[in-house]
Image: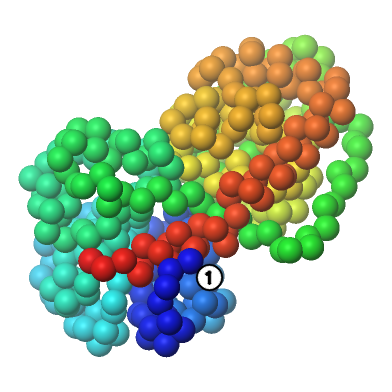
Amino acid sequence: MNERSEYDKTMLKVCFFNSCRAWGGGEKWHLDAASALSARGYLVSVAADRKGRLLKKVVAQGLTALPVRIGNLSCLNLVKLWRLVRLFRRLQLDAIVLNLPSDLKIAGLAARLAGVSKVVYRRGSAIPIRNTLVNRWLFKHVITHVIANSKQTKQTILHNNAELFPEEQIRVIYNGIDFLPDEPVAQKKPAAFLTLGTAGRLSREKNQVALIDLAAELHRRGVDFRIKIAGEGALRERLEEAARTRGVTEFVDFLGFVEDIDGFMMSLDLFVLTSEWEGFGYVLVEAMKAGTPVLAFGVSCIPEIVSDGKNGYLVPYGDVAFMADRVVALQQDESLRRRLGDYARSDARERFNRRQSMDQLESLLAEKP
């Protein structure tokens, strides 16, 4: 924890700026961080897309909500830029935490023009930052600190330009999960069939089509199973068509957006993630908290979360047959599933506790710019 007094803490004004309309791990982090800092005595506001799910959740939690509409070209809109400058001056912000590159280009600049001393860019995607003139200028003249949600993400920030930003000012802060001090451990009820599941946006990089391939392979092997797919997105119709084409419609349930993610994770015997890449993989930790073993392609940051053979298994990317082998082995050995799940729960509590991650965020905000 930092050494600031309670008086200093309650006077610190922080804005979380996230204009993404869709809901995902980044939006969950901004909401959780805003709620946690508000509970710790900070004066917190959240700028979010006026039609997005994040804004609705901010309002529901009683936090100060700032409706915005930001696009890729908003940085060229001088009227919108000046409105943000005036807003930030009125709020007398000490720090702003930004999400999207488009947020950085307009809200980051507006914050600096408004005299905000700490401009923090939270990078949640393990995709290399392009070495453009605009990015070099932003990282030199606008950003004061960078948060990366994994070691892999931190590496990609400097991948195309090692001099883009001082490496010591890039802080890795993992996404955290709430654990109550005496939270009871719910026991999974045995079912007649194995229940697999995943959660996330139905999009190309999440690669849920591999789950359809997995369903077809398990069905071919005579495994009694069901797959639950939680999430919304543009690929839903294509995925449903793929399930029909592969003859596995009766084994795959598309649930849409799931509000009770803890209940969803508890309903699974195995959590499966088939993403091409992840910035962090929030859903993996949520599954681990529920005591559900995880099975995932070993790409990007996922090996930072999944310890092969301890809390689940890593699979070479795209190797659906090998993934099916793991599923069959786990189906046949309930004690192994229980052992992996027990370790997953304790591992999540130790490495991905929200209190720990918020302590780290507090420490960053307490640093002099």
Above or below, comparing residue 183 to residue 292 in the picture: below
Q: Name the spot of residue 24 as percent of width and height, x first.
A: 49, 52
**In the figure, residue 274 lies in which quadrant?**
top right
Above or below, comparing residue 243 to residue 349 in the picture: above
Amino acid at pointer 1: Ala
> Seen in the image, is 117 located left or right of residue 34?
left
Q: Name the spot of residue 61 as percent of width and height, x first.
A: 56, 76
Q: Nearer the viewer, residue 43 or 54?
A: 43
> Seen in the image, is 299 located left or right of residue 123?
right
Q: Mark 1 Cα within 10 Å, few/some/many (few <14, many 20+)?
A: some
Specify the farthest residue to the front. Answer: 3
- Taking the image as drawn, is residue 122 in sight? yes
Name the residue located 71 percent from the left edge and 45 percent from the top edge.
346
Q: Nearer the viewer, residue 205 or 156?
A: 156
* Residue annotated with mark 1: 36
Q: Name the spot of residue 267 as percent of width and height, x first.
A: 79, 45
Name the residue located 68 percent from the left edge and 59 percent from the top edge.
179
**In the figure, residue 30 lies in which quadrant?**
bottom left
> Seen in the image, is 278 located left or right of residue 274?
left
**Which part of the image, by quadrant, shows the C terminus?**
bottom left
Q: Nearer the viewer, residue 5 or 333?
A: 5
Give the SS element for disc 1.
helix
> Seen in the image, is 100 located left or right of residue 291?
left
